[in-house]
Each structure stands twice: as C-alpha cells, then as structure tokens.
Image: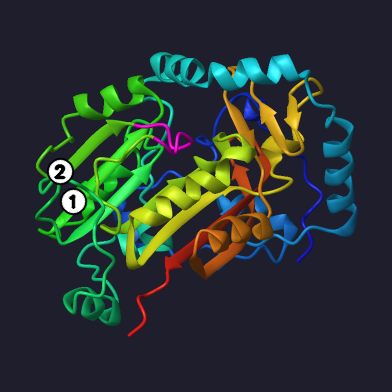
Amino acid sequence: MAAPAVAAGLSSAENMPEAAAEPTESPAEAQKRPQFGTRFLTDPRQVFQHNAWDNVEWSAEQEEAAQKKVQENSQPLPAEKQEEFDNRANEYWNDFYTIHENRFFKDRHWLFTEFPELAPQHKPPRDAEENLLNGEDVPSTHTDTEFPGTSASYRILEVGCGVGNTVFPILKTNNDPGLFVYCCDFSSTAVDLVKSSPDYDPSRCHAFVHDMSDTSAGYPIPDHSLDVIVLIFVLSALHPQKMQNSIDRLARLLKPGGVLLLRDYGRYDMAQLRFKKGRCLSENFYVRGDGTRVYFFTQDELHDLFFNAGLEKVQNMVDRRLQVNRGKQLTMYRVWVQCKYRKVLAST
C-alpha cells in the first residue's frame, strides 16, 4: 500500500528527542496491543480512524524526495562547533531534564509486546540455563563478591533510562521475584529524578550515572551477568565514531544467550527531514535546537555494530509508521528500526 498523499506536520519534531511520537496507552491496552506490523491502511480515506498505521510503504517519489531533502541540508557545521557540542553534551542533557523533569516522555508499556523478554515470568532459553549450570559461562572479571542485585536470577539493564519511562513499567509489570533492574543515564539530573520517584525501589532497582561512550568507565555489574540490555532511542545520541566501542563494552556484560534490545531512529524519519540547514554535524547526524544530538540509522549499520560485537541477529526490522493526530487532522511519517541481538551461547 503506497503512502497516502496527506500533509505531514509536527512543528517541534526538529527540536525534541523521541517522545510525543510514541503511542500513549495504559498497561491494560498494552496487553491487548498486537506487535507492530499488523495494522495496515488499505483505504487512504480511513486514515484518521486510528492513531497509527504500520508498514506504510513509501512510493519511489516519496523516497526520492526524502533523499533530496537530506542532501540539501547535509553541509556539516565547522569542526570547532561540532567539538563544542560534543564537549558540552552532558550539560545539554542536564538542561533538558531540568526543564522538562518527568513531564515529557510517556511510559512505554508497548515494550512488553515488542520485547517479551521484559515481561513477567520470562526465563532464559533452556540451553543457556544449562550452559550456565554446567559452569560454561565465562568467569566474571568483577573483583568484588557483592554488587547490587547479586542474588537476582534475572537481570535487566537499561542504558539511557531518562526519567524511568521504561524502568518503571518493567518494575510495575514484571512480578518475577528474581528480577533486578539496573538503569543508567548520562544525565545526573535524570538519574536524580528516577531515584526521587515513589516507584523507585532500591531492593529491585539500581540507578546510576554513566556515560556509555566512555568505555574506560566501569559498570557496577560484573561482565557476563546480564540477561537483557535495553537501548531505546539512546544509541542515536552518541557520536557515530563512539558507537562501536560502546556496543562492544555492553556486549561483555551479557551472559551467553543474553539479548540486547534496541529501538531507534531510522533513516528518513520525519524528524530527520524537518532539520533545517545549519543543524548537520556529519552525515545523518544532527544537533537539535536544545543542543542534544541525534543520528538516523539504517538496518545494515546497526547489524554491523552488533555483529562486530559478537552478537547474532534475532530481529532487525524497519517500522515505517504513519502516525495520526486525529484532533488536528495531521499525519506524521515515522521510520524506526527495531533490533534484537543475542550473545552467542558457549559451545558445548
């Protein structure tokens, strides 16, 4: 089905991180919601009947127009300006959370549909458990015998947790008594907001400040100890040259059989097309009006990052979504990439 020729609009898309575009739904609605890729727009006249339509095929003309728009605004800023945004990245994100606190992002209950590894009672694959029980897991390089969540049987880490819009739905929904959730963010302001929430439970969660691009900085978790790592619209905030080392470091934290889950911006997403001249840092990498940065991925780029880190593909797909603001009669073409990569099991 070709994308219908209807006007697009979201005036703040250039200046805001991913947030308003995400579907808003209750936990009960999330339980009923099918995975994306199941709601198709077959009649353009029905476009405003739902909030979103999945896998909206772009016409050749629409793809060509997107490429042209990106090319027109691809002149990079001077090197000294780029360096300034890199050096002050922490300051810009702290300012963002100071201004918006916990009012900006919506809780992501859709995660349990797309990533059942986060849902209650999920257990690792049987062969992974057997390898661990047989002592075939790689020994931990952590020097301490105790760390937060030492006694947990299922450990999840979210990198780039913001104010907890992924972490808190997990803690509220997943009743596994062996669950322990770690969450970190580049912004100390964001982490303080997480810890100050009434939903923060130190017996089940540990929040800490961490710069994932600083691969010399240690995590408060042993290597080879995590079942799941979650990256939701966070890898795109890193400088492209720092992405591979960051993923390599995260991969070491996973158990054999553990999975890395990602959702992030895809190439030619509406947010990319709305950037004006003077916002490009390098190819497909931009700075927003508030100083925060964003990269727009292809599936192949993400596959290479994960494959080079020793992870094997379970899922790598593009969600070309047509989102609808029925009140304002606006349509917004979003392009997101969703990935699931697994750490190779120890050979028997």
| Residues in magenta, as a range | 210-216
The majority secondary structure of the magenta stretch comes to: loop
Taking depth in this image into account, of 166 and 249 the one nearest to the observer is 249
User: Which quarter of the rendering shows the C terminus?
Assistant: bottom left
Taking depth in this image into account, of 331 and 144 the one nearest to the observer is 144
Q: Identify residue for label 1.
A: 180
Q: Is residue 308 left or right of residue 276?
A: left
- Earlier in the chain: of badge 2 and badge 1, it is 2
The picture places residue 265, in percent across and down from the top left corner, at: 61, 45
Q: Is residue 110 visible?
A: no
Q: Are marks 2 and 1 in contact (CB under 8 Å)?
A: yes
User: Which quarter of the rendering shows the N terminus?
Assistant: bottom right
Q: Quadrant of residue 191?
A: top left
The picture places residue 160, in percent across and down from the top left corner, at: 41, 37
Q: Quadrant of residue 319?
A: bottom right
Q: Secondary structure at mark 2?
A: loop
The picture places residue 328, in percent across and down from the top left corner, at: 63, 33
> What is the three-letter code of the residue carrying label 1?
Phe
Instruction: Work out whether 80 lies above or below 172.
Output: above
